[in-house]
């Protein structure tokens, strides 16, 4: 009798466990927390609209500055709209290419202080931030064994030319650790030739891992979970490892509200991209045409 | 909440939880600088590992900005210098350097060395021209010994 009771309780327990597992699979929590917008898109839209939406939404990586700051204190729909119009106008004047943190850029500005009235700087983009007309990026290079960083506004009217010498991404979102890395990792010659990727290839990710100089460092890199640093453990003491464990916040990836506050919801994004996507597409087409014109060489008539 | 819990479990191992902001890297009194010209005294001071200390910044804020004149204590002597590169966060388009650089000058504005071996911001050209008076010190001589501008 007692045996039978035990069996039945076990069975009930197993079914309960199974049901719970099933429920979890069916729950609406997104599997990948990195791109919540996409998950929402898949649910809301169907058929053809889905395809179109996803293609348009991809431009949030290419033109991140078109999305406003998610902080509701700083939102102002009229100002954002005016800024977007200004940005498009500027983009019709000058070609602002697609680039990411980790790409190598050459920026030419008109500089009243320089003798030639122009100033060209080459460096790796270590940071890209800000939205709207306040978007800015920072270039870093080591010139004559001296680390130099220059910050530029993306929509600065004094910028004459932005050229992408090498289009690639790195393993991290910000490369401030290059300041503490050995200088060869941020040294780029000023006469670098641009490397042209064949059309349609995805942006390559450079898996290089830098070596840090010994301490003291500018920041506590060990707490930042960096993927692009190879020798961080060498320089740590036991104390640092303990503190790193204590300071970890593993629950943050499950904090949906935090993620929501950091991102622009899909409905707002759709409005923005509907407004600017066509014009951006046109600008890109015009740019491609000019590039083709430049590269096209009339074939020589062959001698018989 | 998690931190409080940890504090209760193990209060000795956690650091104090007061908030600190990032450091400003300003050039103030007693900041160590890096001499970047090839003057004899500057080279020896840097080779010995005793870089100069700021003992006076000649402006009203007493914080050195780019192109400001400073007095430094270097190898037991007082020398004047001009700040030609700062660690501090700069304005847009003005380069920010990994070290605080100084070029030693004498009272007339003539540099002690005859070569600067690091790049120099172009904005210094305008700043130093403004600071030069026809009868006072001539700081533009410093620009002539620069090797590279960024």
Image (cartoon, coloured by chain):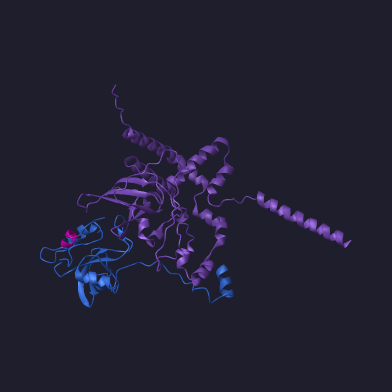
Q: Which chain is purple?
A: A
Taking the image as shown, residue B5 lies to the left or right of residue B86, namely: right
Q: Position of residue B13 (x, y in %)?
A: 53, 75
Q: Nearer the viewer, residue B88 or A298?
A: A298
Q: State the image coordinates of residue B73 (x, y, percent, origin top left).
A: 24, 75
Q: Percent position (x, y) of residue A118?
A: 24, 49
Residue extending furthest front?
A304
User: Residue visible at 54% across and 49% down?
Assistant: A36
Q: Nearer the viewer, residue A186 or A272?
A: A186
Check the image and report above or below for A177 versus A80: below
- Residue lying furthest left: B135
Q: Where, quadrant-wise, is the C terminus of chain B in this rendering?
A: bottom left
The outermost residue toward the right is: A1
Say which of A146 and B120 sits in front.
A146
Residues in magenta, as a range: B141-145
Which image quarter: residue A172?
A: bottom left
Q: Main secondary structure of the magenta part?
A: helix
Q: Residue at x 39, y 59 (%)?
A: A178
Instruction: Indicate whether residue A141 is drawn in magenta.
Output: no
Q: Position of residue A255 (x, y in %)?
A: 56, 57
Chain B in the picture: what colour?
blue
Residue A113 position by quadrant? bottom left
Residue B111 visible, this angle: yes
Above or below: residue A289 compared with residue B90:
above
Given residues A242 and A20, the one toward you in this image is A242
């Amino acid at each position: 009798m007692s045996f039978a009771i035990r069996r039945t309780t076990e069975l009930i327990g197993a079914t309960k466990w199974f049901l719970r597992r099933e429920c979890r699979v069916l729950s609406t929590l997104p599997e990948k927390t990195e791109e919540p917008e996409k998950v929402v898109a898949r649910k809301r839209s169907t058929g053809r609209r889905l395809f179109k939406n996803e293609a348009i939404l991809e431009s949030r990586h290419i033109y991140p500055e078109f999305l406003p700051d998610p902080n509701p204190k700083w939102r102002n729909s009229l100002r954002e709209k005016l800024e977007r119009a200004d940005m498009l106008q500027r983009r019709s004047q000058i070609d602002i290419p697609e680039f990411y943190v980790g790409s190598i850029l050459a920026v030419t500005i008109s500089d009243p202080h320089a003798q030639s009235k122009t100033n060209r700087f080459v460096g790796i983009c270590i940071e890209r931030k800000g939205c709207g007309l306040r978007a800015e990026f920072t270039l870093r290079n080591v010139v004559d064994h001296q680390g130099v960083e220059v910050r530029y506004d993306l929509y600065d009217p004094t910028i004459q030319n932005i050229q992408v010498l090498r289009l690639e991404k790195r393993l991290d979102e910000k490369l401030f650790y290059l300041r503490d890395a050995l200088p060869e990792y941020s040294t780029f010659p000023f006469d670098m030739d641009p490397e042209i990727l064949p059309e349609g290839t995805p942006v390559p990710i450079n898996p290089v891992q830098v070596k840090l100089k010994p301490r003291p460092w500018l920041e506590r890199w060990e707490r930042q979970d960096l993927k692009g640093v190879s020798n961080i453990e060498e320089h740590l003491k036991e104390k640092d490892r303990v503190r790193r464990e204590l300071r970890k916040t593993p629950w943050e990836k499950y904090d949906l509200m935090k993620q929501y506050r950091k991102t622009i919801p899909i409905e707002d994004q759709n409005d923005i991209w509907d407004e600017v996507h066509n014009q951006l597409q046109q600008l890109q087409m015009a740019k491609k045409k000019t590039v083709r014109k430049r590269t096209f060489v009339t074939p020589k008539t062959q001698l018989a | 909440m998690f931190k409080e819990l940890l504090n209760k479990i193990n209060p000795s191992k956690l650091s104090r939880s007061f908030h600190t902001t990032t450091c400003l890297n300003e050039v103030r009194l007693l900041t160590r600088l890096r001499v970047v010209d090839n003057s004899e005294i500057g080279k020896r001071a840097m080779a010995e590992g005793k870089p100069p200390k700021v003992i006076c910044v000649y402006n009203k804020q007493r914080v050195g900005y780019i192109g400001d004149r400073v007095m430094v204590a270097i190898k037991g002597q007082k020398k004047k210098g001009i700040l030609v590169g700062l660690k501090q966060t700069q304005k847009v388009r003005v380069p920010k350097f990994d070290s605080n650089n100084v070029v030693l000058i004498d009272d007339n504005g003539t540099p002690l060395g005859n070569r600067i071996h690091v790049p120099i911001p172009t904005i210094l050209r305008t700043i130093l021209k403004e600071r030069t008076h026809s009868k006072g010190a001539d700081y533009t001589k410093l620009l002539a010994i620069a090797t590279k501008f960024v």
